[in-house]
Image: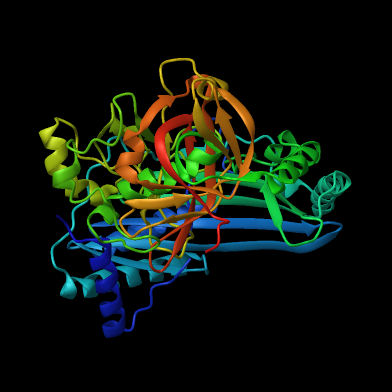
Amino acid sequence: MTASRREFIGQSAAAAAAVGLASAALGRPAAAQPPAVFQGDPAHKELAIRAVDAAKSAGADYADCRISSARSQNIGTRERRVTNIGDNETFGFGVRVLVGGAWGFAASSNLTPDEVVRVARQAVAQAKANRAAMVKPLQLAPIHHPPVPNGVWRSPIRIDPFTVAIEDKVAYLLDANAAAMAAGARFVNSNMFFLKDEKTFASTLGTVTQQTIFRAQPGMTVTMTSPDNRDFTTRQSTDIQPKGLGYEHVLDNDMKQHAARWVEEAKEKLSAKPVEVGRYDLILHPTHLWLTIHEAIAHPTELDRAYGFEANYAGTSYLSPPEEKLGKFRMGPSFMNVLADRSAPGSLSACGWDDEGVAPEDFHIVKDGMFVDYQTTREQAMWLDWWYKQNGKPTRSHGCSYAQTWADVQFQRMPNVNLMPGERDLVWEDLIAATDNGIAIVGDGSFSIDQQRYNAQFGGQLFYEVKGGKITGMLKDVAYQIRTPEFWNALDMIGGKRSYELGGAFGDGKGQPAQSNAVSHGCPPTRHKQINVINTGRTA
């Protein structure tokens, strides 16, 4: 196994103290589909190439440079007033180098020809210093495609959200709030989040790419209270998930139109009967299930967690050590397949190339119910060289490198991790009709998971009692507890292609120093037999 990210961080800290070098801090990713016209400054390409050439001249065996201009905007309202408007932009570049098997990294917000050379040389000096603390030289897996000298990619959007006036966005939210209040909401909050990241990448391998990435998330929360104000409940708009799209995602999901329904569902939830604890067959809607997939499959299959090099944000992984799990651990029934991608149009993790210049590939994490692969970068792929050779596969990165901003060091981050639909054309209603005694859960809610992601608890937005194949009413105070392997092996029904939907997280944390990325999880509805359900409202 090569030197790890933990070793790199340790080496970096030691070297920075010894040499007085300071590595910078702040960065971001991209997706797949023509048509693509880079909208940033064309001079960035020349500066990125200049940086990697300077690093090479200073002694780097490998170097890459990322120049990023990222703008984010958030708008929040409550009832009839605006609560916040934030508009931020960060701009700069980072240079990462490999010298004699040790990493070095430096960054700057001053993008000039002289500065890119200075920072590149600083990164090389840091890498040379890091070698003193190096345990073992790291190696990078080869890239599976030829260098891309003029790559361009852009999120498949129709409307750039930053071309829409703030006044129009505020009016949209206040109109939606008014609709909720007219329907009887006691309180209502609504918001919009947008991101636009223009990123130029160059490496000493000859790859130069320019990408423009968009993300959008509209949302609303309505709150209902009991007549005596002693009880309350909320309904979040989880049926509108964040996407790698533009402002059309806001317009296509008219919150004003949906507001009255969300209020009525909140009213019904407030007066619903409390759930009786016990074991039930659970029918999980895609708007809920994506989060369970995220916590119980996607994070545990990050290779750095499996090796124990990453333990922040809910620990390491039950899928460890790789030698005892790969090809030997049954995750679920034979019809269970989990596929990773960064190519699905409109998904949050979609990009043309990752932050190492690798064109991501689709790959199975779970195939026919068996765990078969982890998420990897170029460095991490070499750790599984033995597994790929054993199975006659090339040792190469799956394209999972990502950095939050230009000043962050890129490391392994999640692609879209998806539970694939079954062969039968089943939909949500079919799973309910086939269930005698169960609970159907819609929308994501609270969650908790242990340090190896073995044991977890999930809430939701809406809970429906299912008796004799029909929904008989709403329940409240529902949460279910799982032990991950048993939960997935309790899967006995799965929806077909027609019922497949994308859910996801706009901000998912990992690392120390922490970084955030965005990821989608596609899935159909599923049914899991005899899962333990608790009552979260019960008091001693």
Which residue is depicted at the point 77% across and 40% down? Answer: 264
- Return the residue nearer the eye: 445 or 529: 529
Expressed as whole percent of the image width and height from the top left, the position of residue 209 reads: 45, 44
Q: Hey, which residue is sitting farthest top in the picture?
A: 424
Asked whether, in this view, residue 115 is left or right of residue 220, the answer is left
Please say if 2 is above or below 381: below
Q: How is the image coloured?
A: rainbow
Expressed as whole percent of the image width and height from the top left, the position of residue 378 reads: 27, 48
Which residue is depicted at the point 51% across and 27% down? Answer: 500
Q: Hey, which residue is sitting farthest front in the picture?
A: 540
Q: Can residue 85 be seen in this snapshot?
A: yes
Asked whether, in this view, residue 323 is left or right of residue 518, the answer is left
Quarter of the image where one finds residue 52: bottom left
- Return the residue nearer the eye: 120 or 73: 73
- Return the residue nearer the eye: 91 or 362: 362
- Return the residue nearer the eye: 64 or 9: 9
Asked whether, in this view, residue 196 is left or right of residue 373, the answer is right
Expressed as whole percent of the image width and height from the top left, the position of residue 129 reads: 23, 75
Expressed as whole percent of the image width and height from the top left, the position of residue 165 reads: 80, 50
Which residue is depicted at the point 26% across and 73% down? Answer: 10
Please say if 122 is above or below 468: below
Asked whether, in this view, residue 98 is left or right of residue 196, the answer is left
- Counting labels gives 0
Quarter of the image where one finds residue 327: top left
Q: Can residue 31 be seen in this snapshot?
A: no
- Quadrant placement of the N terminus: bottom left
